[in-house]
Image: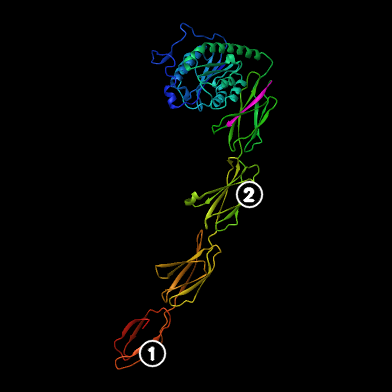
């Protein structure tokens, strides 16, 4: 017989752990420094199961925080009394144990120990795990891992499960419990303290009056041990007779064969198998992600069916599969396999077109069966990575305009097909926005010794003005002037007979365009007009002349004897 013992609790705070279970049961130190329960029934001999039927006992202990360390000692004592009631040995009753909170783990398998003393030592040294309570996941884990030939489980042996819980499970226990019962495991449920009695009844086999227990505290668990072990012992013997009776009948039992997967998509695939022998009531197909730690799910079909489509799966995910044939009072070994779903259909044919300095359009081929599209676009340069923008559109949109882009910048545009909250692989493309339009056709006119007129064609209707920068060809200082949206400007106060380089930029809200460049050379200062001498004497004469150009601020006059001698000069303002 396979006996399954199961302990489940709810989470508790650190404050709960400090005092929970303290002094709830009289304890005394034994010679080794440990504690043992004082038997409240003086002189009562413990019950011993004397049936010749053997059992495989798998104990699943919930080590979650709400039990508390002191109460966990009482759980160990309860387990010692339970183990002591049976004849334990490699050829007799076998006992394995797993512990769980948020995740289950095997403490030892059915074939790990060959004597009762070894099992009792393991129970006494059972560590307290701690954590949350996910009972449904743990029940499935035991079904999948403990009741297997490689774990020491024997064919033709009755199956029994015993649940001990002090609260309500944090996940659904009904389907996993049903799976255990479908596999021929008879379940008992024991509630302690604040256990949910409706949940106990939903887990336990019928009838409730012999399979459901409820006690007020861990300290009085010992009061039910004798009645529990008697009932378990009786059911071991009864099931042993039933199994032996079935084995002499005509019904043949076995596992399904030839697992095949087909019709694989991103969200589903079909599982098929060859029928198991005998009268199969139904088939259970258990499936779960191989590497993501997901909860096992199952699909159940009638025994006349030999395939089922598993739906609502994750894309590009490997799933482990187990198919069980369920008979009237037992379930077969699993037919196992695996399959990997496909990637979600993705966008293709992405094209970026109608590019301007601050916009571009994106279009792509539509994808069937999606909920919409997500479009991400960002400058390709690393220092602008934080400028990524996101747009979500319906499944009917396959062409849209991207706006507020930076001129002369390469962008990466990525489109995802969305399936609810899940996204396909991306389709990406790159395109560079156009630079801002510069002015055109620079012309220099009306150039004289200290000024020049610049003329150009307008850059764009969106230009807000122009920036003119000019510098002497051999100079270091650059002069700059900002003007409005005009198409000509005169530069003044230039140096005569000098070459100048000029650059004109269009100014936009988005920034500055590339430069329109050119150069010119100012004229020399023109000579004075109509030079005349008058009022000549032996020692002096007057010189007069006409102004040759506006803007002259100084004249320099030099003179010397015609037949040789010293040259003299004088400088004077233009008003003289």
Q: Which of pointers 1 and 2 lies earlier in the amino acid sequence?
A: 2
Q: Quadrant of residue 14?
A: top left
Residue 173 in view in this figure: yes
Gap between marks 1 and 2, in whole Å?
86 Å
Whether tag 1 and tag 2 are in contact, CB under 8 A, the answer is no
| Image coords of residue 301 (percent x, y) | 67, 27
User: Which residue is farthest top?
Assistant: 43
Q: Magenta span: helix, strand or loop, mainly?
A: strand
In percent of the image, x 45 and y 27: which residue is there?
Answer: 13
In the rendered image, the vertical position of residue 271 relative to residue 344, given as above or below: above
Residue at the spot of label 2: 398
Residue at the spot of label 1: 532
Which class describes the residues within 10 Å of circle 1: few (<14), some (14-19), or many (20+)? few
Residue 115 in view in this figure: no
Disc 2 element: loop
Instruction: Indicate the quadrant containing the C terminus: top left, top right, bottom left or bottom right.
Output: bottom left
In the rendered image, the vertical position of residue 271 relative to residue 113, given as above or below: below
| Image coords of residue 165 (percent x, y) | 52, 21
Q: Which residues are magenta?
A: 279-288
In the drawing, what numbered circle is on residue 92?
none
In percent of the image, x 34 and y 84: which residue is there?
Answer: 557
Q: How many marks?
A: 2
Q: Say if the magenta span includes residue 387.
A: no
| Image coords of residue 464 (percent x, y) | 51, 63
Q: Quadrant of residue 283?
A: top right
In percent of the image, x 54 and y 65: which residue is there?
Answer: 459
Is 329 situated left or right of 31 in this image?
A: right
């Amino acid at each position: 017989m396979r006996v399954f013992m199961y302990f489940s609790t709810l989470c508790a705070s650190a404050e709960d752990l400090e005092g929970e279970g303290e002094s709830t049961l009289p304890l005394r130190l034994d010679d080794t420094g440990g504690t043992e329960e004082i038997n409240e029934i003086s002189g009562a001999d413990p019950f011993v199961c004397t049936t010749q039927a053997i059992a495989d006992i798998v104990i699943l202990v919930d080590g979650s925080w709400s039990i508390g360390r002191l109460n966990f000692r009482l759980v160990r004592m309860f387990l010692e009394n339970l183990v002591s009631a049976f004849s334990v040995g490699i050829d007799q009753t076998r006992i394995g144990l797993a512990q769980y909170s948020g995740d289950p783990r095997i403490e030892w398998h059915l074939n790990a120990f060959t004597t009762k003393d070894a099992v009792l030592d393991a129970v006494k040294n059972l560590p307290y795990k701690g954590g949350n309570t996910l009972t449904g996941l743990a029940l499935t884990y035991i079904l999948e891992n403990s009741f297997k030939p490689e774990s020491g489980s024997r064919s033709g042996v009755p199956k029994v499960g015993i649940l001990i819980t002090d609260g309500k499970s944090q996940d659904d226990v009904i389907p996993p419990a049903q799976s255990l019962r479908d596999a021929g495991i008879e379940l008992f449920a024991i509630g302690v303290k604040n256990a949910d009695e409706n949940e106990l009844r939903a887990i336990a086999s019928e009838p409730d009056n012999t399979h459901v227990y409820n006690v007020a505290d861990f300290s009085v668990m010992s009061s039910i041990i004798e009645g529990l072990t008697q009932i378990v012992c009786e059911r071991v013997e009864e099931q042993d007779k039933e199994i032996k009776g079935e084995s002499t009948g005509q019904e043949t039992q076995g596992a399904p064969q030839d697992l095949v997967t087909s019709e694989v998509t991103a969200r589903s695939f079909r599982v098929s198998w060859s029928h198991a022998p005998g009268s199969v009531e139904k088939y259970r197909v258990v499936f779960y992600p191989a590497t993501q730690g997901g909860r096992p799910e199952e699909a159940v079909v009638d025994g006349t069916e030999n395939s089922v489509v598993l739906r609502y799966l994750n894309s590009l995910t490997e799933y482990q599969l187990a198919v069980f044939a369920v008979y009237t009072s037992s379930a077969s070994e699993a037919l196992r396999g695996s399959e990997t779903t496909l990637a979600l259909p993705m966008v293709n044919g992405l094209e970026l077109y109608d590019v301007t300095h601050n916009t571009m359009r994106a279009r792509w081929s539509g994808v069937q069966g999606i909920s919409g599209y997500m479009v991400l676009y960002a400058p390709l340069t690393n220092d602008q990575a934080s400028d990524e923008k996101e747009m979500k559109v319906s499944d009917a949109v396959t062409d849209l305009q991207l706006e507020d882009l930076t001129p002369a910048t390469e962008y990466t545009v990525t489109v995802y097909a969305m399936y609810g909250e899940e996204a396909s692989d991306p389709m990406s493309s790159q395109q560079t926005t156009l630079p801002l339009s510069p002015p055109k056709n620079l012309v220099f006119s009306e150039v004289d010794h200290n000024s020049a007129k610049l003329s150009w064609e307008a850059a764009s209707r969106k230009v807000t003005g122009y920036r003119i920068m000019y510098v002497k060809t051999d100079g270091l200082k650059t002069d700059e002037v900002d003007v409005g949206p005009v198409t000509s400007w005169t530069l003044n106060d230039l140096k005569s007979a000098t070459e100048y380089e000029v650059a004109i930029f269009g100014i936009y809200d988005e920034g500055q365009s590339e430069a329109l460049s050119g150069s010119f050379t100012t004229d020399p200062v023109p000579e004075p007009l109509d030079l005349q001498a008058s009022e000549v004497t032996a020692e002096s004469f007057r010189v007069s002349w006409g102004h040759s150009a506006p803007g002259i601020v100084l004249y320099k006059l030099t003179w010397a004897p015609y037949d040789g001698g010293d040259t003299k000069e004088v400088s004077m303002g233009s008003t003289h």
